[in-house]
Image (spheres, grey):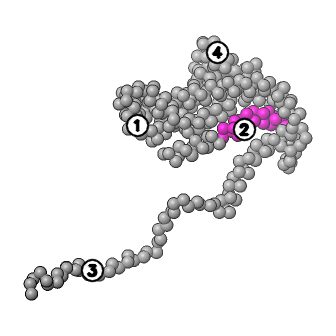
Amino acid sequence: MTTDSLPVRTATPPRTAPKKPAPRTGRRLLRPRAGRQHHAGPLAYILLGITAIVSIFPLYWTMVAASTDNTRVSQTPPPLLPGPNLLSNLARAWNEAAMGKAMLNSLIVAGVIALSTVLFATLAGFAFAKLRFKGRNVLLMLVIGTMMVPPQLGVVPLFMMMSELGWSQELPAVIFPTLVSAVGVFFMRQYLAEALPDELVEAARVDGAHSLRIFWSIVLPVARPPMAVLFMITFVHAWNDFFWPFVVLDMTNPTVPVALTQLSAGYIRDQSLIMAGALLGTLPLLAMFLVFGRQIVSGIMAGAVKG
């Protein structure tokens, strides 16, 4: 018998003992399943309903007070249902406070301030976040430091400056001191520092794009969500601003908050008339939020998911 006819035995791997399962602890890790939708419970809906009622009640009370007379508003307990005098009170407030001109002035002032703040704050935020230049940190600290200075400290020199320029009692006196805000610059800087990759800016530099081209083609598409939020906040703040317009404007060329002071003049204040004027001043803001609210919220969510 030759060795070629002998059976060849292959080496079998050694048997290993089966692994013991790891001991279970009392705490169980829950992993979210892909595509799983989370539904709110009854308690969440109750809390949301209470929050919505508390938030809407001041506006509802303004409408109730504007639809009654001064005697009914001053009673105890006050009325909780609208009255029949809403349209008449709105007409009186519109005529006595010159609300037409005041709304036009407020629209011009708030629109220009909001647009300029968004533009300049985005430019400055991009410079502080992605550009390298000497004194950048010092300038940023100075911008942040201005947020801690009360605006009332600069009223007297600012009023003197507006008088020297010949802008007293004119809308430019309200617009130009607030063309940009430190809060807007800091807000845009923080967003662009996280949402805009440095590699994207460097790639544009390699392709030969200058800073303005990078800002127009890269920064603006990335910064749309915070720009929408900043525009909304700035517009509402400029629309409701009372102190500086009251100082620099008069009753012949007022904004809405300044015009509402005419309704409170007199020995006996008509609370229903004041509430009617306040309701007229609030309606444009409500209309703007109803028109652009969904776009603003979707922009915030898109920016949050992207980040």
SS at mark 2 in the image: helix
Query: Which numbered disc, 1 or 3, marks the residue closer to the eye?
Result: 3
- Gap in angstroms between the C-alphas marked 4 and 3: 92 Å
Q: Which callout, 2 or 4, points at the residue further toward the start of the chain? A: 4
Q: Which of marks 4 and 3 is nearer the N terminus?
A: 3
**What's the residue type where badge 1 is placed?**
Leu
Q: Of the residues tagged 3 and 2, which is closer to the observer? A: 3
| CB within 8 Å, label 3 to label 2 | no
Which-is-in-front pick, marks 2 and 4?
Answer: 2
* Badge 1 element: helix
Residue 237 visible from this viewpoint: no
Seen from the viewer's position, the closer of residues 141 and 32 is 32
Q: What stretch is highlighted in magenta?
A: 271-293
Circle 2 is placed at which residue position? 286
For disc 3, the marked residue is 16
- Residue type pointed to by label 3: Thr
Quadrant of residue 289 within the rendered picture: top right
Which mark lies nearer to you, 2 or 1?
A: 1
The residue labelled by disc 1 is 200
Task: Give the spatial CA distance, label 1 vs label 4.
Answer: 44 Å
The kind of residue on which mark 4 rests is Trp
Give percent across and percent down for residue 36. 56, 61
Q: Position of residue 116 (x, y in %)?
A: 57, 26
